[in-house]
Amino acid sequence: MKMRTALLAAFVVALVLIVLLVSLREYYVAIALTVGAVILTRRELWYLMKKRKLPPFDERVRENMKKSARNGFIFFAAASAALMLFYTINLVYVTNRHPVQIMSGLFLAGGLVYLLSYVFYDRVEPKLDEKELRRLKAFLQVAGIAAGACIASFILHNVVAGLLGIEEPVFFVIAVILSPVAIAVGLIGSLVIFARGLVRKQLPSERVSQGDVVPE
Amino acid sequence: MKTRIKEYRAKYNLTQEKLAELVGVRRETIIFLEQGRYNPSLRLAHNVAKTLKTTIDEIFTFDE
C-alpha cells in the first residue's frame, strides 16, 4: 500500500512539474520528463491497462527502486554541491544560464542515474560475474574520485595562486588534464561493462559450465 | 543458486503468471527466480515453497 501511495505522489509531483515546465516554456525538459516517466512506469502502465489494477510491488521491485533512488539522490546531491561551489567561487560558465534550466538539467541527470541504476539492478547485475562487478566498481570509483579531485584541484589552484601570487602548475595539471582523463576512462569503462551485461544472454553460472569464465 | 520452480510449476500445471498471482509477486520475479538470477528473502522462498506444496530445501539449492 505504501508503494502505491508513493507512486501516486510521484505521479502527482511529475504532473505538477510538467505543467510548471510547460508554463515556463521549458518544453524540451517537459518532454524528457514525460518520456522518462513513461519508460520508468511502462510495466505498471501496461499492467494497469491490461488488468485495470496496479501490479504488486514485490520485494525485488522495492529493492531495485530503493537502490536506484539512493544512487540518484547521491548523484543529485553531489551535482548540486558542485554547482553551488562553482557559483561560490564564481566560475561563470554556468551563471549565464537560467536557474530553471540548471535545476531542470540537474533533475534530468539525477533521473537518468535513477533509470540506469534501475536497469543495472534489474537486468545487468545478475549477468555480470564477480570479476566484472569488481571492475565496474573500480571504474565508477575512479570516475567519482577524479570528479572530486577535479573540483578540489580547481579550488586549491586558485587558493595557492591567490595566496602566493604564483602560477601554480601541479593542481592546474590535475584539474585540467589528469582528472578529466580519469573521469573519461572511468565512465567509458563502466559503460562498456554495463552494455556488455545488458546485451548478454547467459548468466555467469551458465558461462562457467561452458568454460568461458574460469572461477577463482 | 538453482531452483526447481519450473518443474513444480509443470507438476501443478501453473503458468508463471498464475504462480506470481498466488505468491503475490510480479511475473518477472518468478522468471528471475526460475533462472536463479534473484536471491529471494526467506519469506518469499517460504511463500513459493508453500504455494508449490513443498519445502524450501526441495525448491532452492545452492552451489558450494
Image (spheres, coloured by chain):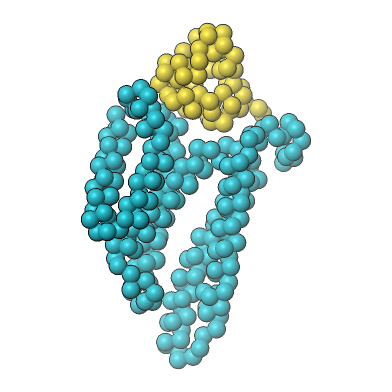
Chain colours: A cyan, B yellow
Q: Position of residue A9 (x, y in %)?
A: 26, 40
Which residue is drawn at the image coordinates 49% and 90% (left, top)? A166
Q: Quadrant of residue A158?
A: bottom left
> Is residue A75 among what the camera can see?
yes
Residue at the image position 65 percent from the left and 27 percent from the top: B63
Furthest residue to the right?
A211
One can see residue A73 in this view: no
Q: Is residue A162 left or right of residue A19?
A: right
The picture places residue A95, in percent across and down from the top left corner, at: 33, 73
Q: How many marks?
A: 0
Is A161 positioned to the left or the right of A23 in the image? right
Tell me: A70 left or right of A211: left
Q: Is residue B56 above or below residue A155?
A: above
List the single residue furthest toward the bottom: A165
**Residue occupying image coordinates x 49% and y 65%:** A147
Taking depth in this image into account, of A36 and A147 the one nearest to the observer is: A36
From this view, report whether residue A36 is shown above or below residue A172.
Answer: above
Residue at 50%, 37% (x, y): give it.
A122
* Figure quadrant of residue A37: top left
Q: Residue A198: x percent and y percent?
A: 58, 42
A144 relative to A33, above or below: below
Measured as percent of width and height from the top left, residue A1 is found at 29, 29
In front: B23, or A37? A37
Q: Quadrant of the C terminus of chain A?
A: top right
